[in-house]
Image (tube, rainbow, N blue to C red):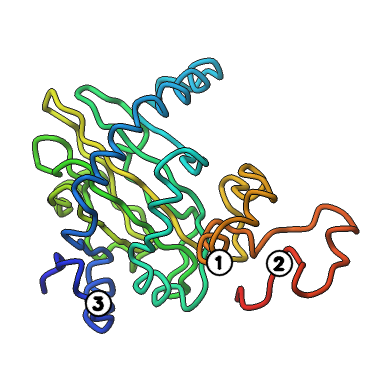
Amino acid sequence: MQNTLDYSTTDLVLFDEVIGKYGWIIYENALDPQFVEDIKQSLQPAYEFRRKIQVNNGIGESTDGTLHHLVEKDLFSLKFLEQKFGDKQIRHFLGGQYILNSLGAVINLRNSQTYVQNIHRDIRTFTGTYRLMFQMMVLLDDFTLENGATYFLSGSHLSDKKPEASSFYEHADRALGKKGSIVLFDSNLWHAAGKNNTDEPRRALTMAFTKPFMKQQMDYPRFLGYDFGAGLSEDLRQVIGYNSRVPADFEEYYQPVEKRMYQRGQE
């Protein structure tokens, strides 16, 4: 069964078959080429800002090339989320409304030793058939064998057992694809970034989406500001998490239904 499709393909039966068997799927031609370039241009200053904090806090070695929490007012993230890439698939996989758990990026460089090259899955507890989290990776450069295309151990989302490294690298597939493609995958799937053996960076956005009741890695509504959220579209308010907040005091708790921090329909 082919697990690389054009982004125009919205067949959810086929999506279920591919995700069920392999645990991952590639949708090509998802992002406009100019938008890809715009995102790439914005990553370096965002990385330099985060890198200073990583180094100052003593975690510079393991976080080389990683950018966490790119949900900022003046970055590309709001424009990206507003376009609802993969919305039908994510909504179908999670069974209804969802929110953004995290949005970051990886700049994979030659000789990088970042933690994303470790064999891992993106959810700490194996959830089996209960679908709690779903992952998205956006290719900002072509993914090749030479520049560290991600390893995916197809079918490993069905097992709780972490594979031995030798078995993983012997049997894992590689996410080879063109820039502008989107990779969707089950959070239970074991995977690892490959090593970049070229002199050019291999960049990607990394995202996790969850059922709304799951705690976000960063409180995006509070980070952006509650007043800022009032001016966003309803779709953005939903995915960023404005409809599934937790009250911090009695004033926030005792509110009419339409003003409650945790809105109806978030199951």
Q: Amino acid at mark 3?
A: Thr
Q: Residue furthest top?
A: 56
Element type at marker 2? loop
Return the x and y of residue 248 as percentages of the image width and height.
81, 52
Q: In which quarter of the view is residue 22 placed?
A: bottom left
Residue at the spot 65% in from the left edge and 57% down from the top edge = 230
Which of the two marks, 1 or 3, is nearer to us in this view? 1
The circle drawn on residue 262 is 2
Residue 183, horizontal then vertical, whole percent: 26, 57
Q: Secondary structure at mark 1?
A: helix
Would residue 261 be found to the left or right of residue 112 on screen?
right
Crowd tier of the residue under label 3, counting other residues whose Cα lies within 10 Å: few below 14, some 14–19, many 20 or above: some
Separation (CA) of disc 1 from disc 3: 23 Å
Q: Nearer the viewer, mark 2 or mark 1?
A: 1
Question: Label 3, label 2: how many angstroms apart (C-alpha)?
Answer: 31 Å
| Marks 2 and 1, how far apart at CA | 14 Å
Q: Nearer the viewer, residue 3 or 121?
A: 3
Task: Identify whether 169 is placed above or below 188.
Answer: above
Discs 2, 1 touching: Cβ within 8 Å: no
Label 1: few (<14), some (14–19) or many (≥20) C-alpha neighbours in 10 Å = few
Q: Position of residue 9 (x, y in %)?
A: 19, 74
Residue marked by disc 3: 10
Q: Which residue is mark 1?
A: 234
